[in-house]
Amino acid sequence: MLVSKQIWLLNQFEPSSPLRSNVQLCFEILTLAQAIDQDCANRLSAYGLSESKFVLLGILNAAPEQQCFPNLLADTLGITRATVTGLLDGLEKSSYIQRLSGSHDKRKVAIQLTAKGQDIFNQVSAIHTEWISELFADLDPAEQKVLKKLLLKAWKKTDQYQTQLEQEHAISH
């Protein structure tokens, strides 16, 4: 399951070292996450989509009248407006979305999901959800609960977790 650079790094530890075991577990989780991410990208690319384009279609599909403004799409995806513009250009070229100019302010453009965009989102969403579900289908509910608990323990040691806590604390006060 490990790649050669990880194996080399592990071999720098004594075989009986508890550090080696912890580092190996981290590498195994990283390798699994990378494999899932790559499989996801490959599956979506078969439909001409990236993960960001797929999620953008999902946001539009769930939006009132299947419309949203680019700045809200950027905020929801956690990316820049310029990046959203590039994603929208690709989706528009595929006829999955259309840009609607505002009647009062021509600079204010709403993005609307087209029927073709809704069809591709629904098709890919069903396939994608089934694939993701199958990844952990061999774990019974008790095993899934234990895995979630163990992953949360590791998550709480990350800088991102601490940042998230600080942001939630700032919002609540």
Image (tube, rainbow, N blue to C red):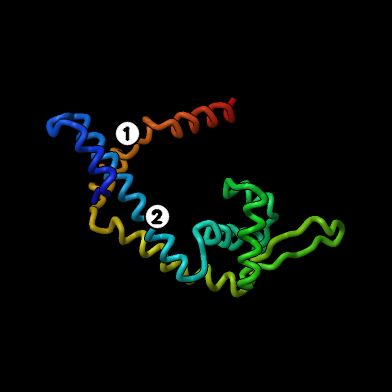
Comparing 52 with 124, the one in front is: 52
Classify residue 7 by image quadrant. Answer: top left
SS state under label 2: helix
Select label 2 or label 1 by which is in front.
2
Mark seen at residue 153? 1
Disc 2 marks a residue whose amino acid type is Asp
Q: State the residue at coordinates (28%, 38%).
A: 150
Across and down, in percent, residue 138 comes to: 23, 57
Classify residue 129 by image quadrant. Answer: bottom left
Q: How many marks?
A: 2
Across and down, in percent, residue 117 comes to: 59, 70
Q: Is residue 44 left or right of residue 21?
A: right
Circle 2/circle 1 CB separation < 8 Å = no
Q: State the residue at coordinates (39%, 57%).
A: 38
Give the residue at mark 2: 37
Is residue 173 shown above or below 85?
Answer: above
Q: In this view, does 162 lie to the left or right of 113?
A: left
Q: State the residue at coordinates (53%, 31%).
A: 168
Q: Residues within 10 Å of mark 1 (few under 14, many from 20)?
A: few
Is residue 80 shown above or below 164?
Answer: below
Disc 1 marks a residue whose amino acid type is Lys
Across and down, in percent, residue 44 comes to: 46, 65
SS state under label 1: helix
Across and down, in percent, residue 5 comes to: 28, 44
Quarter of the image where the C terminus is located: top right
Q: Distance between the residues labelled 2 and 1?
A: 22 Å
